[in-house]
Amino acid sequence: MSDYIAPLRDMQFVLRELQLLDTLNQLPNQQDMNAELVDAILNEAARFAQGVLAPLNVIGDRQGAKWQDGDVRTADGWREAYGKFADNGWNALSCPADFGGQGAPRLLSALVEEMWNAANVAFGLCPMLTRGAIEAIELRGSEELKQTWLPKLVSGEWTGTMNLTEPQAGSDLAAVRTRAEPQADGSYRVFGQKIFITYGEHDLTDNIVHLVLARVPGAPDGVKGISLFVVPKVLLNTDGSLGERNDVRCVSIEHKLGIHGSPTAVLAFGDQGGASGWLVGEENRGLEYMFIMMNAARFSVGIEGIGLAERAYQRAVAYARLRIQGTEIGVPGREKAAIIRHPDVRRLLMSMRSRVEAMRALACEVALATDLAHSHPSEAVRRERQAFVELMIPVIKGWCTENAVDIASLGVQVHGGMGFIEETGAAQHLRDARITPIYEGTTGIQALDLIGRKIARDRGAAAFALIARLREARLALPDDDPQLAAIRHRLFSAINALDDAVNYVVNHYDDQARQVALGSVPLLELFGIVTGGWQLARSAQVARERLSGNDGDAAFYRAKLCTAQFYAGHFLTRAPGLAQAIVEGGDAALAMEDFAF
């Protein structure tokens, strides 16, 4: 098996040469986040990912997590690795400084997260969920809740979870039945069962802080009657030390296709009189608060997709360099060649590479916008950047994870029959990636969010603002450079296709919602393809300038140009067809009678 090598050079290119770091440094709270500090953090993260997490990836896959009598034991080495992770401050990297965090920008933490996920995605799920719990408590919890729970969540001494799904509810949170009964001391007694709880039980830490959706007595029906509660695994004594176990029990963990190292728990609350919980914010506003966690988690799941795709690409390239098979087409003689010399294998590898680079740059653009939305001194800029972030969250989550599955599958294909053999490692990436388009809302749910909440609700304002940015970026490409001409032309057609599709949603959502919904996933893919092309076009322009100026590292910049040209020819060219499917493809599927399927 090949080793994971963090793609630091490409990360530095995105931060520096696409000038994202320069923009970040203009924020009043990020002026010290200079290139030297960023490089130091990324280099240390790379060492931890490569040296500690990556070697445990196969161990976690093969051993998995083990359940016995309500307790869960993680794979060999995981507890020690988590201890190092917390002790080295990685859990606190992007957490609020008021509670012991380092306050790093999302732009930086997104790239660090990519390394965790590429090295060992099953491990990376744990701190991801803890970060979501921290955000929900920080933004909506009382001062008492913050002081009680945040310091040890931030440090990583405790971990956090999200508890939404129930057996009868699935993604339909209106059907949540878990109930919370108020007590005289201001706490609540929680009763119910939750399923699919990632790291709902484990041996990495001594306490787990569950954030649980439940209904209080007399709550309205549907999603308007859901409240959010902190329900710890272990209760605290008055001095803050750990006390007795709460009435929370792990009934079982799931046997899954992938991410075997990550325990996915079924949790029972209140089997012995009620689990003690504390309300976050106000009653009946739990779903609103949980969306804080969900949106953060959705972006992070998109980052998972990028990490998995990068790892699958690296493994495929390593194999293609070493595997000798067949002769090279068009070359005289019968000498055997490495398969990386075969045209179709090169097509597969470029398909993988170009999308990984497009996804990484796009995710960083959204991460930077998140930082600007939080900290820019101009309220107008904060609003505009927040609208862009909200528009793009379903795209990052849906497009990057769907790409991850396809890229991991192509990785198996590059390996040929050996890819189907577990020992090569290619199959694990495909198995691990397959969950990412499902959890935190399936791609279909992300796409409905995109057309409904993010486009139709504001009559396309945020989408059209983005399209205007895309057109400006295309116009910035020199029209007299033959290496950029094809990219410029294909980006023009792709932007027009996206514009047509958004106009269709805006003009028809109110009276033809079903037809529009049928094209929602193709629209999400179209958004990803076009905005990814925007980022690679910017990359190509920078690369061309560096090559013209003989700025060094010529091989890197030539590869950037080739990657962007391939993406334009193989992915941007798909945009008009997707737009046609969105606008004209709905009637047949809706006309089909149910019994005929």
Image: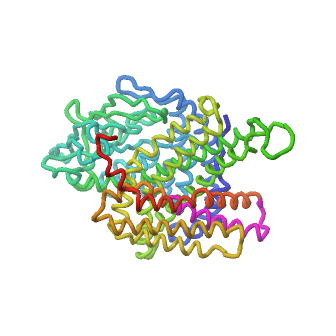
Question: What is the quadrant of the C terminus in the image?
Answer: top left
Magenta stretch containing residue 158, yes or no? no
- Residue visible at 75% across and 45% down in the picture: 341
Q: Is residue 116 visible?
A: no
- Residue visible at 33% across and 33% down in the picture: 266
Residue lying at the far left in this picture: please name it.
Answer: 218
Residue 533 location (% of width, % of height): 57, 62
Q: Is residue 211 visible?
A: yes
- Residue visible at 55% across and 56% down in the picture: 359
- Residue visible at 45% across and 41% down in the picture: 435
Magenta stretch containing residue 539, yes or no? yes
Residue 351 location (% of width, % of height): 62, 51
Magenta span of residues: 528-554
Instruction: Out of 266 and 499, give the one closest to the viewer.
Output: 499
Residue lying at the far right in this picture: please name it.
Answer: 333
- For this view, does 564 lie left or right of residue 453? right
- For this view, does 16 lie left or right of residue 580? right
Q: Tell me, what colour scheme is on the image?
A: rainbow
Instruction: Out of 129 and 310, give the one closest to the viewer.
Output: 310
- For this view, does 320 lie left or right of residue 441? right
Residue 380 location (% of width, % of height): 41, 76
Establish if 507 lies above or below 327. Answer: below
